[in-house]
Amino acid sequence: MTGPSLFEALADALPGLPRGLAVTGRGSLPSAFRTTDLAAASMGAAGLALSLWAAGAGAPAPVTVDRRLASMWFGWTLRPRGWDVPPPWDPLTGDYEARDGWIRLHANVPRHRAAALRVLGTGAERAGVAAAIARWPAEDLEEDVVREGGCAAAMRTVEAWSAHPQGRAVADGPLVRVRPRPAEKDRPGRADPARPLAGIRVLDLTRVLAGPVAGRFLAAFGASVLRVDPPWWDEPGVAPEVTLGKRCCGLDLREADGRAAFGRLLGECDILLHGYRPGALAGLGWDEDARRAVNPDTVDVGLDAYGWTGPWADRRGFDSLVQMSSGVAAAGMAREGAAGPSPLPAQALDHATGYMMAASALLGLARRARDGETLSARHSLARTARLLTAFPETGRPAGHAPETEGDLADGVEHTAWGPARRVRFPVAVEGCEARWDLAAGPLRASPPEWP
């Protein structure tokens, strides 16, 4: 294939990112698209952005990423010892055959599950749900579930998505929407080259995978990451994976006390990560102008599912739904001759977007220290899907060799659920130590304050 590599296309979207990534390791995940290339490129971009920040006025240090380990980090890195992580999916979440195609329901969130059942007019048994869906046109059901407050996605081809109004809006926008803003205070650079993010405060208003992946990366290099969840939120199948290195607190931003506490935390943070749909934070009284009034120097990095413009900009979504909408699952089905949707071998849109968010945050820190400017950056799962679908897999990769003891990091992580091992970290930034000072723990276990 001629033209830029996947890494070059990704790096071009991150202004100021150093080049010169070294990739080691062999093998590729079996996929209709270059999923392992995406893993190596996005994790490498985060490493290169860290090297820029760590260098200060000097030259960025070399960065290496292992493509085999990067593929593994696009899945589940935790290897429990004597206990099991709860299943990540609700029993009703999954793909169903509709009258004229396929549709996926996402029922992990109780209110989304209830919305789908109200539309279908059936109980919560999967067989009954499947029978009800079989009577519906897929796109009609998608619209009715979304209108009811649920989450669903009809399967479209890449071509159909390219012609769809939302697909066109996504294609017309950049991979990362970056807007510089003047900062008001001089902010110091890194104090400890080996732990270059020590002293950096990250306020994390993200859930499930993409945003939490960004915070996990920043925590690896010393950042103090404080995750904020509302009282009713839970993600038991994901928390042991993504709370590594973080403190987790609870705040209800609908209540005066919660909003006041959030304002105090925001006023003292360096990076804000948020994954609310466009307009959702504004509805809670915290639009970008309000956030900037409290802390004009924050590097503000946000993500959503379907993009920041277009008719679906405010639509709820998750990686598996965007794979259905954007043609990824249909391409896999066609490539494999499968009987139903065939998604990527990992939730790669989430993971790649998360590492790109980390890169944006780090480039923002470097820009703030160097130029006296901060920035806001906006990412979306749909735009990451657009990047990936531009790079189809032309061969037939057999996948990686089976995991061995050598793929695991030394030592045992004593999580809140029990002991575990982790897969070795794929990214090496010369002179910087990657380690997490806190084991994975439950949501809302810490007070809403900085350590």
Image (spheres, helix red, strand yellow):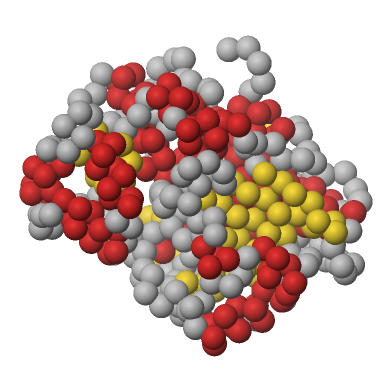
Quadrant of the rendered structure where residue 115 is?
A: bottom left
Residue drawn at (63%, 12%), measured in percent from left and top? 2
Q: Please give the count of numbered marks on the rendered protein.
A: 0
Q: Is residue 229 above or below residue 216?
A: below
Quadrant of the rendered structure where residue 203 is?
A: bottom right
Q: Is residue 201 above or below residue 51?
A: below
Figure quadrant of the C terminus: bottom right
Q: Residue 358: percent from the left, percent from the top?
A: 64, 52
Residue reaching furthest to the top: 2
- Foreground of the two, 210 or 278: 278
- Foreground of the two, 180 or 33: 180
Residue drawn at (79%, 66%), measured in percent from left and top? 297
Task: Judge from the rendering whether residue 82 lies leftward or rightward of residue 231; answer left or right.
Answer: left
Q: Residue 153: percent from the left, percent from the top?
A: 33, 41
- Foreground of the two, 183 or 142: 142
Q: Is residue 6 above or below residue 86?
A: above
Q: Residue 265: percent from the left, percent from the top?
A: 65, 78
